[in-house]
Image (cartoon, rainbow, N blue to C red):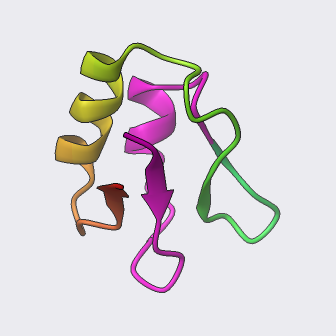
Amino acid sequence: MIPKVDSEKCIGCGACVAIAGNTFKLNAEGKSEVVNPTGDTPEVIQQAVEGCPVGAITLE
């Protein structure tokens, strides 16, 4: 499953980067984006999805 970030929902808190820093980064606008969809293990990516306080990350 591939993580996707809804930039409209993202508040740029950085939780996903802290949890799965090989998969996510904050872009120039301060919003999360996927830089490597397989950068972390599926379990770690799932933790990042669950750790997003606004539900901006989904797995497709």
Magenta stretch containing residue 8, yes or no?
yes
Q: Nearer the viewer, residue 50 or 3?
A: 3
Task: Name the spot of residue 27 as percent of width and height, x first.
Answer: 75, 57
Q: Position of residue 47 (x, y in %)?
A: 22, 30
In the picture shown, does residue 32 fall above or below 49? below
Total label count?
Answer: 0
The image quadrant of residue 11 is: bottom left
- Residue at x-position 27% and y-position 53%: 52
Q: Residue 16, percent across and down?
A: 42, 40
Q: Nearer the viewer, residue 13 or 2?
A: 2
Relative height, residue 12 to residue 10 (above, below): above
Q: Is residue 45 left or right of residue 10?
A: left
From this view, report whether residue 44 is shown above or below residue 7.
above
Q: Quadrant of residue 21?
A: top right
For the N terminus, which image quadrant?
top left
The magenta-colored residue range is: 1-24
Residue visible at 39% across and 13% down in the picture: 41
Residue 28: % across, % down: 82, 63
At a point 38% along the width and 42% down the height, the residue shown is 15
Rendered-image quadrant of the C terminus: bottom left
**Where 15 sits versus 41, above or below?**
below
Find the residue positioned furthest to the bottom. 8
